[in-house]
Image (spheres, rainbow, N blue to C red):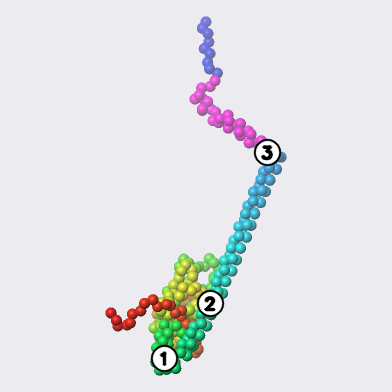
Amino acid sequence: MADPVIRNPVPSLLRSLMTDHLDPGYAAASATRSKPPGRFDTVVLILGVVLVGCVFGVALAQAAGFSDQSGSDTLMRVRDADSRAASLESDRNSLRDEVQAARAAALQDDSGGASVLSSLEQLEAAAGAERGAGPGIVVTISEPPTPSDLSDVSKNARRSSEAAVLDRDLQSVVNSLWVCGAEAVSVNDVRIGPGVTIRQAGGAMLVDNRPVFSPYTISAIGPLNRMQAQFSVSDAYLRMSGLEQLYDIGFDVSAAEALEVPASSVRTVRSATQVGEP
């Protein structure tokens, strides 16, 4: 009788792949994880969480303190710079008055000097290099008030930045006042003269490269009745009235019997050509 055939007791590779889906190592790892953590492991985990929380808390506190200190230092430097600028401007005005008084005392004694002094005064008046005073009108333009409901931004959607009053709005009003007969104009006590620009840089409004803030007060000295009549029908008036209705911009025009505007900054003349020369 033939000997029985001895078969391999180990299942074939194909059967093993079809029936044993997990490697034995995975089963061992799963069994290890399923064990409940011991008391020591729990204490170590709690201490680790507390330590990480303390580190983050100290870091946030230091960052907040640094931010507050940096903001305070910046604000203090800005205020100091404003104070120094105001003091220097006051000194400059005092020295200018002294120079003008000394010049007048030196030139007004003879006829030739008086003629030169008169010509200088006319040129300074045309250049806005001396203070102006007289009747005129005051145009006040201000940013819209902050809405109580921040979700309602329909009246403040003129552009992407926060400012609703643009530099071209102030330019339009100033140019219209010149056309209406203004003899001297200032914006927030900054005299408008030759070479003076009104422009925006980022979110700041600059007049003669000096920052000015809302409300913008435009003072114009000139014939009161004529300026009132012509400005009320000008394109600038209609423009600002429309912006007032659309974007809630503040716009007000008032008459003044006595206005004062400061002198403009006198720039150094590098070159000049007499009118009429080729």
Magenta stretch bounds: 10-38
Q: Residue furthest left?
A: 278
Residue 81 appears in the picture as rendered: yes
Q: Position of residue 100 (x, y in %)?
A: 47, 86
Mark nearest the camera among 3 and 1 is 1
Q: Is residue 45 above or below residue 254?
A: above
Mark nearest the camera among 2 and 1 is 1
The kind of residue on which mark 2 rests is: Leu
Q: SS at mark 3?
A: loop
Q: Position of residue 36 (x, y in %)?
A: 68, 37
Camera-nearest residue between 66 and 246: 66
Residue 118 appears in the picture as rendered: no
Q: Residue at x 52, y 15 (%)?
A: 7
Read off the residue under disc 3.
37
Read off the residue under disc 1.
113
Read off the residue under disc 2.
88
The kind of residue on which mark 3 rests is: Pro
Q: Residue at x 55, y 71 (%)?
A: 81
Q: Position of residue 54 (x, y in %)?
A: 66, 51
Q: SS at mark 1?
A: helix
* Quarter location, residue 82: bottom right
Q: Position of residue 161 (x, y in %)?
A: 48, 67
Q: What distance separates the C-alpha of mark 2 from that of mark 1? A: 31 Å
Q: Residue at x 53, y 10 (%)?
A: 4
Camera-nearest residue between 225 and 194: 194
For marks 3 and 2 on the same chain, the one whose residue lies earlier in the sequence = 3
Disc number for residue 24: none
Is 31 a magenta residue?
Answer: yes
Q: What distance separates the C-alpha of mark 3 from that of mark 2? A: 74 Å
